Structures are given as C-alpha cells and as structure tokens.
Amino acid sequence: MLYAKDAAKENVVVRGARVIDPVEGVDAVLDVRIDDGVIAALGQNLDTNAHRVLDAEGLVLAPAFVDTHVHLRTPGREDEETIASGTAAAAAGGYCAILAMPNTDPVVDSAAMLGSLIEAGRTEAEIPVGFLAAITKGQSGAELTEMSELAAAGAVGFSDDGVPVAAPGLMRRALQYGAVTGRRIALHCEERTLSRDGQMHEGEVSAELGFTGYPSVAESLMVERDLALAAYERQPLHLLHLSAWESVQALRRALGDGVQATAEVTPHHLCLTDEAIRSLDPNLKMNPPLRSESDRTALIEGLKDGTIAAIATDHAPHARHEKDVPFEAAPFGVTGLETSFAALYTQLVEPGLIPLDVLLERMSAGPARAYGLDEPRIAVGSAANLVLLDLNASYRITEETFRSRSVNSWLLGETVKGRVCATIASGRLAYAT
Amino acid sequence: MADIRVMREDLRPPASPPKRHFISIKDVTRDDVERLLATARTLERSMEREVKKLPTLKGRLVINVFYESSTRTSSSFELAAKRLSADTMSIKSSGSSVDKGESLKDTAITLGAYDPDVIVIRHPQIGAPNLVARVTDAHVVNAGDGKHQHPTQALLDLYTMREELGRLEGLHVAIVGDVLHSRVARSLIQALSLMGAHVTLVGPPALLPRGVEAMGCEATTDISVIGGADVVYVLRMQRERMQEGANYVPSLREYTARWGVTPERLRPGQKVMHPGPMNRGVEIDPRVADHADALIETQVRAGLVTRMAVLYDLLTSGPIEVKTESVFEVA
C-alpha cells in the first residue's frame, strides 16, 4: 500500500546515539547496525562490518515518523506540491511514510486515477507514500466510489477529507461497504450548516475581530454522529484533525464503550490557539480552525492518555499569491511536514506538557497503527525506519529551509529547538543534513 | 498611535522607519484619543471662518481607496484632506484594475509607487488595511474593513457624545441592533470602554456575537434596557450582509416590532445616534430619526473634523496646540 522509488538499501552503523523506542521500551545509548536496509544488531561498540559509520553521539535515534494526513496537491496543483517535493519535505521532517489525501483536482475516485498516482509514487517518491481514495465520487457526498476495486488497486484507506460526508445514510453505507475492503475510513467531521462561512473558531476572539465563527459544535456534533454510526455498525473509523474539547470527550466516551476509533491531531492545534489570529496572518487560517486554550489543553490531555493515537500534520501547501491576501480571502491550510517535530518538541516537550517518548510514539507507531501499517521499530529484524534528532539545536525557520514547494508555514520567523539530522526510510537514507 | 503588528518580521521591507497607522481602536491609547478629540475641536473652530482651507498638509498626498460603496466616509475623508490642502486621489474598485482581477497587494504596490503620505482604505475583507500597511510606506487609515473595525467612525461618535453630553467617563451607551455584522459596533465598544464609558448591547440573540462580553460590555436581548441609557446608538440592519436562509431573525417586520427604536421605547431627552445610512422604519422609527434629540447630522459634521484631526495627527506626529493658530493661516 506504500510506494517509493527504487533505491539502494543502506549498510551503515549509527554510533553512540541515545536510542529511544517507546514501543520496544528502549532508552539507552547504543550502536545500531543496519545491513542491507534491515536493523541487524543493537549493542555497545558494534563491529562496523566495513559499513560506513554515522557518528551520532549526543543525538537521539528514534523510530521515524509516519504522517497520515498530507496534501500532495497532485494532480492539479503541482505548482504547490508534487509527489517528489512533498516526499522530500517529509524526509526532511523525519518521516519514513506519509499518506496523501484524495481531494486533488480531479479527485482520486477511480482505480485509473489511483494507478497513475501509484506509478508516479514508484518513480518520484523519496520516501514511501500511500494514497487514500475518496469515499464518494468527486467527493460530492452522493455516490460511493468503487471501494473494493480501489482497495485492490492499492488505496491505503478512504476519505472525503476537506468535506464531510453530510448525509448520515450515506455515511452508514460507507462504513458497511468499507468493511469488505479492510481499509480504514477517515472522516472530516464538520456540520456545514453550523460552520457556514466560518473563518475562525467562534468565541471571544472572533467576536472582537468580526470574523464569522466556526463553532466547536460544528465538529463535535459530526464526531458524535460518526461514532454513533461506527458503534451501530461495529466498524472501525479514523477521525481526522480533531480540534475541539467536545470532540475529545465524545471520543473518550466512545472508546470506553468499545467503539473501534482512532483519531489524529495536528501540531498547530496542539501549539496554538485562536488568540494567535489577532495578527490576521493568513498562515494561521486552516480548517478546522485554531480553538481556545481549553480546547488545546484537552487535545494535549487526549494525546497523553492515548485517546488521540496520532499526530498528523494536515500539510496543506498553498501558492504564495493565494495566501498573500486578507485573511478572509485566503484558502484554508498550512504546511507542516518539515516543522512538526521541532514545533512540538519546543512547545510541548520542553515546557513539560508531554514526555518525549509519548511524542515519539504518537508521531510514529500511533499513526501507523491507525491505518494498519507496519510500525517503525528499533528492533533486530525490523526494516530500518529511523530518525536522528538533535534536541539541542536551536534555529530560526525561514522560507529557504523548506523543500516543500510552498512556504505557508505558521512557524516562519519563529525560533525552534530540535532538528532532524537524518532520516532512514524503508532502509534507505532519505535525508541527511 | 501604535505601530501595527507586522505579520512576519522577515516579510517586512528592510529598514523602513516605523509608520503610524490608524487601523484599529486597539492601535490607540486614551491619551491618543484625548489628543485627537482636542485637535478635532480646534479644527472645528477654524471651520467657522469664512475661508475654511488650511495650508497644513500642503504638498502631501492622500489616496482614498474604496472597495465598497460609501457616501459619508469617502466624502468626509476627501473633504478633510482638501481642507488641509493635501493633494487627494480617489480610487474606487469599479472602473479600476480591481475589475480586471488585480489583487489588493498589487493595487497597493501600484498606488505606493506614487509615494502617498496616507492611504485611506475601505475594503470588504478584514485585514485589508494591514496588508496595505505591509506593502507600502504610507500611513494607513482604515475606513472600514469587513466586519472588523471602523475606527474613525468611533472617533467621530466619541467627539459627538462629548460635545453633546460634556463627558465620556461614566456615560451609559446602549448599542442596538445587528452587532454581529457591524464594524461600527466593534470599534465603538472598544473606544467607549477605553474612555471609561459603559456599554450595553441590545439585539436579537443571533446578532449578538457569542463571547462579545469579553470586549468589556454587557449584552441583552431586552430592548427595554435602552430607556436607562444616556445615548441610544442604533445600528443599521445590514440587509446586504444577511445571507439568504441564515435566519438571524424571522423577518425584518418582526425585528422592527421587537427591536425597533421608537419614541415609546425612549425617555424624553435621550440622545439617539446612528452611523448611517438609515433604514427608516426598520431599525429606527422616522419620528426618532427626525427628532431634535437625534444627533445624526451632528455625527456627519463631526466626521469631517475628526478625520481632519486623524490626517493631521498622523502627518505631523504630535499634538496640535491651540495657541499656535499661525499654522492655520489661510492658504
């Protein structure tokens, strides 16, 4: 279900890093030897076996990250991102696998369309990429796509991301039929009669600035509907980019009742609140919107206790001229692939809001599990999916640092701590500083 | 007035000196407002002369860019600049390159090439003046951006209230109507609370923005509270902003019955204000609009002198002193 261009597998010894794998329960200074792209040995003073040596003293070696929510803008808006540029950006962000959303132009809703993307993935992708297909034809919310054929053609899951599946009856059919494909259904939860024309979170800041509000209940009402349908049909589902306290509460309750649900949260919802929008910076406009501090706290809490299994960037590149307009005229979406670890390390781990091992798990094993992908592990016999991190590096984020074709990052000009030094994806060195 | 907050440090043109702008009431302090009101009063006195033109801003260029229709705001800005002897230029969106799809940024850069001292902008989108401030070297005055701010309207309203009632501190102002869509209301709430006045918002539930009390005011759906206010400030029912099917109120008829400002709902002697244009018979009863206690025309007159004060203040960066009447030599 994941595709990347062919490349020679790595033979390397990573020397002296602090190796952290929260799932394996490892946290020790170790050497890691990789033979032909597979982790062959872990230990002290490993024989180099004539491999090249990566001196990683003072650095952290962790399972590489998995991003379940990326917009590669291909086909249709290759000026904003391509499979090549998006996967290069992902490699620079420490990712060993990403999943691309199907809300392209045209929408990925047929096996032919999916096949052409998979072909492009095989020739262009710097790291393995998987493609979701749409739940409904053209994402118009009227007719199911041929999900079984799409799954057989390689779709990693199904989503109408960007728009909700508005009709409950159709949502139920999607869950029923999705079950025969064995693939996850991922839902963008938004009740559009409540969020209509919404520009930002409805609350004190929108009241003052005058922006039309997009209330939390527009999300949580749909989350509750979809969880109720999942419970009724006894089918799993994945909730995209949760933003509201009420959504986390609803999910926690449903999980307690045995519903098979997973959920993701973005770095920007974990780091920012609607207060930031006072700057009127269009790079703070996204859907769902930044919410209040109590929402942010609930998201962090949900991430910590495992209610929210995954961090996903919702990397949404936009052309410069489309964002260089008044806030209200700007499209929704911000980039995130290249800044996610640094942003979260700086804003959540350094201040003590979440422990490092939780962050690493939610960026790697958590998202992989949500879609039934192989979890990156640091264990003998596992494929080498590794990220090398310098937790002490402090630097300023500028446009020049991006490999993405777009620069609509909310972190431009900010100073962060925590640098990705190297990424090994599927046994291949995909990025190194 | 404070510098505006730039979006991103590295997007700002290098080494440009900080410019003062008037984009939001949040840009000014109470001292700034006192100074602007005093300047406006001085200017009003000078307007009593037979020849009303002052040479103060001779050789300066003020460009008015209006992306929305406007009578009083655009005319008063233009006249204000002319009375101060500035050169003026007025650009309207229809008939300009905007019709050809030119972006605001490109239009602003084009106008910026004439080195204007001030750009006055009205635009339907929140944050448009901030963008103009970012890409030009002009002082930017916000003449209304979407539902966000209309700071010179608030200033002229403060001026009118103080002239008529003698004070702002402790004044009780009821603002009635469609607060949700009103940039006038947002600027006025902030301006009144900055000056120590007390504000009560009155309107239908869906037109009172959720969380608005955090701006330092009260909000109620009960129209009877207006009887206790010193000033009743009536907002226009913004019919053009009412999307079809939004159902903010079931009908204008029902709005008028429940929230219309009528003589029966007022105390004798209560002052009534309206930013215009009025929908007579909708939000305001014609008997109220035409009564001597209505200050609507006074507001228009105040608009001229307060806008003159804003242009003067931005371009001379300092308080105006009453005794130095020599600066007001007739041109």
Image: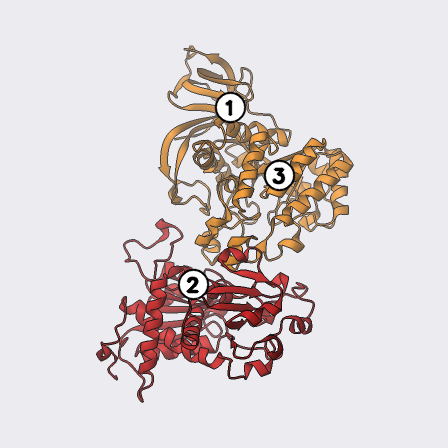
Q: Which residue is mark 3?
A: A248
Residue B100 seen by the camera = no
Q: CA distance from mark 2 to mark 1?
A: 67 Å
Dot placed on the residue nearer the N-terminal end, 1 or 3: 3
Give percent across and percent down for residue B311: 34, 71
Q: Is the same chain shared between marks 1 and 3?
A: yes
At horizontal 59% and vertical 37% (from top left) the residue drawn is A264
Q: Which residue is mark 2?
A: B196
Q: Does the rendering let one see residue B79?
A: yes
Chain B painted colour: red
Q: Which residue is at the front of the view, A325 or B214?
A: B214
| Dot in front, 3 or 2 | 2
- Say what amino acid the circle numbered 1 marks: Gly
- The amino acid marked with disc number 2 is Gly
Q: Is residue A116 above or below residue B103?
A: above
Q: Which residue is mark 1?
A: A427
Residue shown at the point (34%, 69%) measured from the top left: B36
Q: CA distance from mark 1 to mark 3?
A: 36 Å
Chain A tint as drawn:
orange
Please tell me how crowded label 3 is: few (under 14), some (14-19), or many (20+) other residues with Cα within 10 Å.
Answer: many
Amino acid type indicated by mark 3: Val
Q: Nearer the viewer, residue A425 or A266?
A: A266
B52 to the left or right of A159? left
Q: Chain of mark 1?
A: A
